Structure formats: C-alpha cells, structure tokens
Image: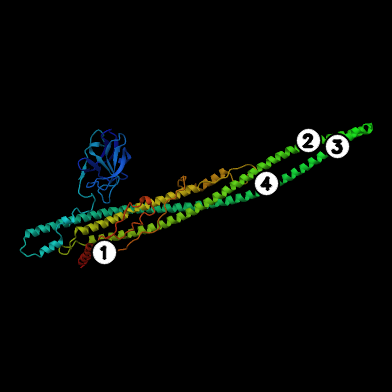
C-alpha cells in the first residue's frame, strides 16, 4: 500500500506519514483506516492537543466519545479532533485522529512535490439517529419485520390465500435471517478481538506479578542489611559505654592531682613564711658577725630553693589550667556522644517500624495478587466455556424454517448486551494494572526511604571509637543496593498509597445453557469494584444480568432445537 505524508495546509509543516487508507466521515473529515498503535506515526510528529476534553454531540457518529481539539504544533492551527476515549464496540478507536480535509494536505512519500489523493475505503455518515456501535440491530420493536411465529400463523390460514403474499412473506423472512446471521458473525468477530486483547492484558498482568515478587525478594535483602546495621549500632553503643568509663577514671585522676598540687602549694607557702621569720631573726642578731655570716649563707641557699619552688608553682598552675580546659573539652565531647547515641537509637526504632510496615504491605500485595490470579483464572475458564458453546453452535447445521422458533429483537438485544458485559468484564484488567502500579510505587518509596544512611560524624581523637566514619557507612549502605537494578527515588513526604481491597468480587457460576441465552457467566458487585483505586472508581459499572420471560423462552427453544438436531 502507498504511503503518504500528511502536512499542515497553513504552514506546510510535516505532521506524519502513514498508509494511504482512509475513512471519510461526512464530507469534511477524514480519519486513518488503521487503528492507532505502535505503527501509527502521527503522534510522533507535530500534532498537539488543546482546550479541555468534551463529549461528542448526540445523534452523531462521535456521540458518547470524549474529544479534544487537535492542533499543528508549529502554527497552532486547528486541524481536527482527537478521540481520547470511545464507547465499547465503537467504530472509532481510542487515540484516533479525525482530520479536517481543508486543514491538511496529502503528499506522496516518495515525491513530496506531488500531491496525493486519499484512498477512501469507506464513507460514514456524520449524523445518525443512534450511537455508532458495532453489533446492535437498527430495528426497533415498533419496526419489527414479520417473525417466524407470524409466518406459521399465516400458513394455517385457508388455502385460498394469495400465493404472491406468501412469497413476499418468505422473502422478508429470508432477509431477516440473513441480517441476523450477519449481525451474529460481526458480534462473534468483535468478541474474538476482545478475547485477544484480554489474553495480551493477562500476559502483562503475569509480568507485573513477577515484578512484584522480585521486589519482595529485594525487600527481604534490604531487611537483612538493616539487621546488620542494627547490630553494628549496638556494638558502637557498647564501645561508647567503655569510653565513658575511661573518661570518668581520667577525670577522677585529674581531680586527685589537682588536690595534691593544692596541698603542695599550701606547704610551700608555710615554708616561705618560716624562712621569712628566720630572716627577721637574723637581722636582729647582727651583733654576732660570725654566726650571721653562716646564717646568711644558709638563708641565701633557702631563698634560692624558694625561688625554684615559686617557678614550680607557676608551672603547676599553668598545667592545672590546661588540665581544666582538657576536662571541659572531654565533658563536651561526652555530652555530644550521648546526644548522637540517642539520635542513632531513634533512627533505628524508626527504621524498624518502617521495615514492619514494608513487610505488611508486601504480604497484602501477595495476597491481593493471588486473589486477582484466581479471578483471572475463573474468567479464562468462563471464556473457554463460552468459546466451546459457540463452537458447538457453529458445528450444528442451521434448523429449517418449520423447526426454528422466532427470535424477537428484544431477545437479540439481550444476547448483544450479554456480549457487551463480557467486554466490560475484560476491560477490568486495566484497573488491576493500575492497582499494581500503585503497589509498585509504594514499594519503591519504601526502598528509597530505607536506603537513606544514618551516619554519625567524628568528634575528635578522644571519641574516635564512639561513632563510625560517615564515608564508611555511606559506602556500606551503597554496597547493599549495588545489586538492585531498580532506580531509587527520594521520598518527599510520608504519603501512603490507598489500602488494597482484599475482598474478592462475587462470581456466579452458570450452566452451559445460560451462555446460549445471553446471560453472562460472572458478575461483580458495583461496590467492590475498584475499591483499592479511588482514581479508577466508577470507570466501569458492571451491568447486572437480567433474566426475562423472553430470555427464558429463548433458552428453552434453543435446547429443543439442539435436541432435534442431535436426533
């Protein structure tokens, strides 16, 4: 298929390249025939959205769709609309662009100078009298075609009835049968597409469960590292106690030395006073020259000793002052060490509480994952049973006109609504993925919070054994997370994710005959859905199954037709 390049008609900017296959909506709009996905290159180029999302107009093709204006990123010219969200079984897809013909220009991808003509695969009406969904019958109960029951009633009329009228009735019945068969095939095709989407989403869910298990293993490793850090902190606390006792002993020794120095100082003062008294007595006895000379020599020697004692006293006072300063510094260091030890204990208690919370969250996540796995298994089993019923119905040849009962449009609506309920049930996988994303975010936040190291700075040589080196603690903490491939994020605040709802949704087991009557195999309480995800609460309201008298009669007629076919 040829590839065309879409350009803006206002500024000639390149908007994207895609296959030349289009759906025409009315006379003024085009939309790509391919559904948006990985191969859709329009969002990768210069198309942006503006204004607030709005709902499509009623009685139009986009009725019930959520739309937003699409603009050229270069000149900000409105080039159409973007379908953000569409109803179930809608002809348009989520994220599909509806481009205005007058606002775009198509050029050949091989030669940008040559203009290309759009290849219109299908033309859709912009305005209609009912929503553009696939699989619903356009007929109403008031506009019903003649049914098989009416045909049987007419065949019992007298033989004088006009054969042309009977032929017209048979043609009308044949058209109804063809229309019902085409609608059924279209519904089955849509159902198989929905089942393929469910299988892909189930695979993604299994991958999410595996990642949650890997995260749980990482949490157990983190808990082991926290236990080792706690033992290191206890050992540091014991060392701090021994250092404090040694400092107390040194302080007592210093006090004893100071007391001895004071006693020596008082003794030296008393000796000096005695020497002074002896000197005075020597001056009074000047008349005895000989004795005075001897006493004078002795006094001079004593004075020299006193001067030496004074020098020793001055040095002792200086040493005492230095000892006091060292004692004050030691007391301050001991006070700081005690304060830091208290902070370390508080940090250990906080980490212990966070580890307990992490354990509880991990256990809740594993329990929720098991419940979701059981729910998904039950859904797969119901889908397999429904496929088996469909295959069995296809294998049986269609009954003749005389054996097949009539099917009213109301009963066909019940069948269509049941298949729509199955599609809604399949769309609930997205809510499960959202809940697992919330759980993964909370696990990452707890990992980042537990990875913050609690280091104590070094206060000096006297308390070197009290606290460990901050660089060594940081290296040890980083080495614990070297093998963890996940990227840690810093926590800006304590914001707990909403609790997960561990109550499994109710399921109602039905027999194989209920699938043929259009009754869905399982339903969930509307109050239990999305209870763990407030943001996603109310997105999907599961339709409740209804059993009417017409559905019961249709079920019985289907069983009788199956028994007659086997006979």
1 vs 3, front mark: 3
Residue 247 got which mark? 4
| Label 1 – label 4 distance at C-alpha | 89 Å
Where, quadrant-wise, is the C terminus in this rendering?
Answer: bottom left
Residue occupied by mark 2:
311
Q: Is residue 323 left or right of residue 134?
A: right
Tell me which residue sits at (21%, 41%) in the image. 119
Q: Is residue 130 left or right of residue 432?
A: left
x, y percent for residue 351: 52, 50
x, y percent for residue 153: 12, 64
Mark 2 Cα within 10 Å, few/some/many (few <14, many 20+)? Answer: few
1 vs 2, front mark: 2
3 vs 4, front mark: 3
Tell me which residue sits at (64%, 45%) in the image. 334
Residue occupied by mark 1:
513
Q: Nearer the viewer, residue 20 or 333?
A: 333
Q: Marks 1 and 4: CB-CB under 8 Å?
A: no
Q: Is residue 211 left or right of residue 333?
A: left
Looking at marks 3 and 4 on the same chain, the residue that comes earlier in the sequence is marked by: 4
Residue occupied by mark 3:
275
For numbered disc 4, what is the local secondary structure?
helix
As drawn, 304 above or below 356: above
Looking at marks 3 and 2 on the same chain, the residue that comes earlier in the sequence is marked by: 3
Q: Is residue 225 visible?
A: no
| Label 1 – label 2 distance at C-alpha | 117 Å
| Label 3 – label 2 distance at C-alpha | 17 Å
| Label 2 – label 4 distance at C-alpha | 31 Å
Mark 3 Cα within 10 Å, few/some/many (few <14, many 20+)? Answer: some
Q: Is residue 359 left or right of residue 84?
A: right
For numbered disc 1, what is the local secondary structure?
helix
């Amino acid at each position: 298929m040829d590839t065309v390049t879409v350009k803006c008609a206002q500024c000639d900017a390149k908007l994207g390249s895609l296959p030349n296959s289009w759906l025409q909506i009315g006379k003024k709009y085009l939309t790509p025939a391919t559904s948006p996905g990985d191969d859709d290159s329009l969002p990768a180029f210069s198309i942006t959205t503006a204004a607030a999302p709005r709902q499509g107009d009623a009685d139009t093709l986009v009725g019930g769709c959520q739309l937003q204006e699409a603009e050229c990123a270069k000149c900000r010219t409105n080039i159409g609309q973007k379908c953000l969200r569409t109803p179930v079984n809608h002809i348009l897809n989520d994220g599909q662009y509806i481009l205005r013909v007058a606002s775009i220009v198509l050029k050949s991808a091989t030669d940008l100078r040559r203009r290309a003509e759009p290849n219109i695969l299908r033309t859709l009406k912009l305005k209609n009298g009912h929503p553009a969904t696939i699989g619903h019958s356009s007929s109403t109960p008031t506009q019903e075609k003649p049914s098989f029951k009416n045909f049987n009633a007419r065949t019992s009329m007298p033989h004088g009835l006009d054969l042309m009228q009977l032929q017209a009735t048979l043609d009308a019945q044949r058209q109804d049968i063809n229309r019902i068969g085409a609608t059924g095939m279209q519904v089955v095709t849509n159902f198989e597409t929905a089942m393929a989407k469910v299988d892909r989403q189930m695979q993604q869910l299994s991958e999410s469960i595996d990642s949650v298990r890997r995260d749980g293993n990482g949490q157990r490793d983190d808990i082991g590292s926290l236990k080792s850090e706690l033992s290191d902190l206890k050992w540091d606390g014991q060392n701090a106690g021994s250092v404090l006792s040694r400092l107390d002993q040194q302080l007592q020794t210093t006090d004893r030395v100071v007391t001895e120095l004071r006693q020596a100082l008082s003794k030296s003062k008393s000796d000096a006073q005695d020497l002074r008294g002896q000197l005075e007595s020597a001056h009074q006895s000047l008349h005895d020259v000989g004795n005075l000379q001897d006493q004078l020599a002795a006094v001079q020697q004593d004075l020299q000793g006193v001067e030496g004692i004074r020098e020793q006293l001055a040095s002792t006072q200086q040493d005492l002052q230095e000892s006091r300063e060292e004692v004050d510094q030691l007391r301050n260091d001991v006070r700081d060490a005690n304060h830091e030890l208290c902070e370390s204990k508080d940090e250990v208690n906080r980490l212990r509480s966070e580890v307990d919370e992490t354990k509880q969250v991990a256990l809740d996540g594993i329990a929720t994952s098991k419940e979701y796995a059981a729910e998904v298994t039950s859904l797969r089993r119901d889908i397999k049973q429904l496929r088996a019923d469909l295959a069995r119905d296809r294998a049986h040849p269609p009954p003749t006109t005389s054996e097949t009962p009539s099917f009213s449009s109301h009963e066909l609506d019940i069948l269509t609504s049941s298949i729509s309920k199955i599609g809604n049930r399949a769309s609930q996988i997205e809510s499960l993925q959202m809940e697992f994303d919330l759980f993964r975010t909370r696990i990452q936040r707890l990992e980042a919070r537990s990875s913050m190291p609690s280091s104590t700075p070094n206060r000096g040589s006297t308390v070197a054994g009290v606290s460990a080196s901050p660089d060594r603690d940081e290296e040890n903490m980083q080495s614990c997370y070297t093998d963890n491939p996940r990227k840690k994020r810093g926590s800006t605040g304590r914001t707990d994710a909403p609790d997960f709802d561990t109550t499994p949704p109710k399921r109602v087991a039905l027999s194989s005959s209920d699938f043929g009557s259009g009754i869905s195999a399982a339903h969930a309480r509307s109050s239990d859905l999305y209870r763990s995800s407030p943001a996603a609460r109310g997105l999907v309201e599961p339709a409740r199954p209804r059993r009417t008298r017409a559905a019961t009669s249709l079920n019985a007629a289907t069983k009788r037709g199956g028994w007659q076919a086997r006979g």
